Amino acid sequence: MLLLVSVAWPGLLAAFLIGAGTGRWAGPPAGRLPSLAAALVALLVLVAGAASLAGLAPGPLAVPGREGFWVETAALMLAGYLAGCILGAALPRRA
């Protein structure tokens, strides 16, 4: 995973900045449906992260080869985007 971060840091930084801008623009979820959608995205991050970590041990959940690299990269970028969204939404707005 450290090698993945060292290679993909520009994309990770871009995902974080795009997420921060999106979170700042949209603000925190207000209402039941947006909160449910935010929880679904967080669940997707957890599932993708678990799938990438499952590649460390052999078994039925391991994703080998190029597809495993794609899953790990997508999980990392999605986690960075979500962290940016949370940070951007948490920043106070000035009137």
Image (tube, rainbow, N blue to C red):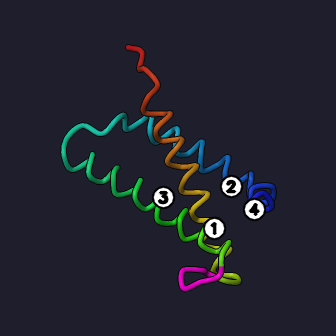
Mark 1 element type: helix
Disc 4 crowd rating (10 Å Cα; few below 14, some 14-19, many 20+) is few
> How many numbered discs sit on the rendered protein?
4
Instruction: State the residue position of label 3.
Output: 45
Q: Which amino acid does label 4 sit on?
A: Leu
Name which quarter of the figure residue 24 lies in.
top left
Where does the magenta region start and end?
58-63
Which of 94/35 is in front? 35
Name the side, left or right, on which 89 lies relative to 53.
left
Q: What residue type is labelled 1?
A: Glu
Residue 4 badge: 4
At horizontal 58% and vertical 49% (from top left) the residue drawn is 80
Q: Does the magenta stretch include residue 79?
A: no
Instruction: State the residue position of label 2.
Output: 11
Please report contact status of discs 1 and 2: CB closer than 8 Å, yes or no. no
Front disc: 1 or 2: 1
Residue 48 badge: none
Front disc: 2 or 4: 4
Mark 2 element type: helix
The picture places residue 20, in percent across and down from the top left corner, at: 52, 38
Vertical side of 43 occupied by 56: above or below: below
Which of 36/2 is in front? 2
Which of 50/87 is in front? 50
First of labels 3, 1 by sequence position: 3
The picture places residue 34, in percent across and down from the top left corner, at: 26, 47
